[in-house]
Image: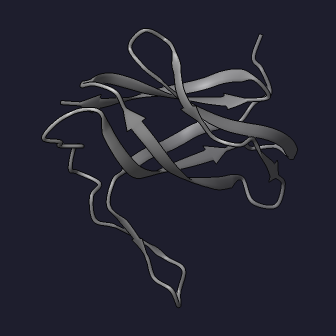
Amino acid sequence: MKLNLPSVSAFLCCRQVQQDVISKNYELLGVFQGLNSPGYPLGAEIVTFCRLAHDEAGEFQIDISLYNEKGEKVSDSAPRKMVFGELPINDLVTAWRVVFPQAGTYVFKIFCNNLNLAEFKLYCR
């Protein structure tokens, strides 16, 4: 049985993001750079970009949560309503202020109507 849910076609986590004040376009300067820190706990401001695709009309609630290696929730976003119809693709941009208590692997989980759509790992060294 296939669920009628959108799919995640792209996910990006970036530490250094600038937005042009006039055009409102994002400049992804830190896309290929990891989070480097002289020590932990590390407070970081990051931005996630999530592109969702759905080939039918529909309305969904999307939210993203960040978990540590133990499966404990570190941070989460406010749920956002996404409407698919005329456009089959929607982008979700989320700004995060996160405190990473220690080095390790963290996981962004994308939920749609409380169902886990996808997971993306973030490695902090």
Q: Position of residue 76 (x, y in %)?
A: 60, 35
Residue found at x 54% / y 47%:
50
Q: Position of residue 75 (x, y in %)?
A: 55, 33
In the displayed structure, would residue 72 be above or below residue 6?
above
Identity of the residue furthest to the bottom in this view: 22
In the displayed structure, would residue 116 be above or below residue 9?
above
Residue 83 is left or right of residue 37, and the answer is right
The quarter of the displayed image where residue 85 is located:
bottom right
In the displayed structure, would residue 56 be above or below residue 74?
below
Q: Nearer the viewer, residue 17 or 116?
A: 17
Residue found at x 49% / y 76%:
25
Q: Quadrant of the C terminus?
A: top left
Q: Position of residue 32 (x, y in %)?
A: 23, 51
Residue found at x 65% / y 45%:
53
Residue 95 is left or right of residue 106, and the answer is right
Residue found at x 35% / y 44%:
43
Q: Quadrant of the N terminus?
A: top right
Q: Nearer the viewer, residue 53 or 62?
A: 62
Residue 74 is left or right of residue 39, and the answer is right
Q: Nearer the viewer, residue 22 or 70?
A: 70
